[in-house]
Image: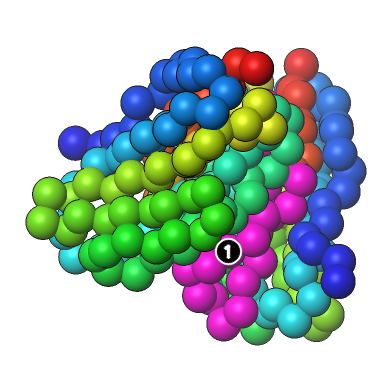
């Protein structure tokens, strides 16, 4: 049973560019949440998708957007990248947006 | 006041020691609490998931929630070098946040 998978593993971008990160949830899960984890910090909630719609959103600007597909996989898009967007981006999946969330390995984004 | 306070450590203990990791939180209405383990440059791994007050045991790990003092703890018995990681506490969020995390405590178990 595959767990949560994310791609790519690492990514290097320059300021002003755009990036797309991808996530496949754990088998049987239908809800995907995205978190940003800066170095030395706990994960910060970005947004959550359920039934292909954004259900909840944390305190992140509109430069951060997402999408969920019919097969429950999800994308996170970040436009106009800033140096401060450098972080580990984590995807977590759950069933029916329950609190018991399972995380993927993350995508490490570096913005130069 | 930050929602979840957690001492970042680092905490260094000898192999076989009992480890106590702690967090405090601000809103007594929260019911669901979690502990995650995160190895360096990896995603968090769910260790313990508890509801309301009381203890939950799983092997060498015990999670404890004291809602009256808004205090959550994770105890690791017979600690092993493989337990060396960052431990994150979390609870359900209020408003629009599914999970709220502490900053994590970095633990090193020395053989």
Which residue corresponds to the image point at 39% horizontal and 53% vertical from the top-left? B63
- The answer to whether A71 is drawn above or below residue B14 in the figure is below
* Label 1: how many Cα within 10 Å (few below 14, some 14–19, many 20+): many
- Residues in magenta? A85-105
Q: Is residue B31 left or right of residue B33?
A: left
Q: Position of residue B31 (x, y in %)?
A: 29, 67
A101 part of magenta stretch: yes
Within the image, what quadrant is residue B95 found in? Answer: bottom left
> Tag 1, which chain?
A
Q: Is residue B25 left or right of residue B97?
A: left
- The answer to whether A97 is drawn above or below residue A76 in the figure is below
Q: In what quadrant of the picture does the C terminus of chain B appear? A: top right
- The answer to whether A99 is drawn above or below residue A42 in the figure is below
Within the image, what quadrant is residue A66 found in? Answer: bottom right
Which residue corresponds to the image point at 89% horizontal and 43% vertical from the top-left? A8
Tell me which colouring the rendered structure shows. Answer: rainbow
Q: Is residue B78 left or right of residue A63?
A: left
Residue placed under numbered mark 1 in the picture: A101
A5 part of magenta stretch: no
Q: Position of residue B82 (x, y in %)?
A: 68, 32
Foreground pick, A56 / B31: B31
Foreground pick, B66 / A35: B66
Outermost residue toward the left? B68
Foreground pick, A57 / B109: B109
Tell me the SS state at disc 1: loop
**Number of marks in the rendered image:** 1
**Residue B97 appears in view:** no
Foreground pick, B59 / B66: B59
Q: Position of residue A62 (x, y in %)?
A: 56, 50
Q: Position of residue A90 (x, y in %)?
A: 67, 47
**Residue B57 appears in view:** yes
Which residue corresponds to the image point at 76% horizontal and 45% vertical from the top-left? A105
């Amino acid at each position: 049973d595959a767990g949560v998978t994310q791609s790519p593993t690492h990514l290097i971008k320059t300021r002003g560019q755009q990036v797309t990160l991808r996530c496949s949830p754990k088998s049987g899960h239908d809800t995907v949440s995205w978190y940003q984890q800066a170095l030395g910090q706990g994960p910060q909630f970005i947004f959550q998708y359920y039934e292909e719609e954004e259900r909840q959103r944390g305190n992140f600007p509109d430069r951060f957007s997402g999408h969920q597909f019919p097969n429950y996989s999800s994308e996170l898009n970040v436009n106009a990248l800033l140096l401060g967007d450098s972080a580990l981006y984590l995807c977590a999946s759950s069933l029916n947006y329950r609190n018991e969330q399972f995380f993927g390995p993350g995508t490490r984004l570096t913005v130069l | 006041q930050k929602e979840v306070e957690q001492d970042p450590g680092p905490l260094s203990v000898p192999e076989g020691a009992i480890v106590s990791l702690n967090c405090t939180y601000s809103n007594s209405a929260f019911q669901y609490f979690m502990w995650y383990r995160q190895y360096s440059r990896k995603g968090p791994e769910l260790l313990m998931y508890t509801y309301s007050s009381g203890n939950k045991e799983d092997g060498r790990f015990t999670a404890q929630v004291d809602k009256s003092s808004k205090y959550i703890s994770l105890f690791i018995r017979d600690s092993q070098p493989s337990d060396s990681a960052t431990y994150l506490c979390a609870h359900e969020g209020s408003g629009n946040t599914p999970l709220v995390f502490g900053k994590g405590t970095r633990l090193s178990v020395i053989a």
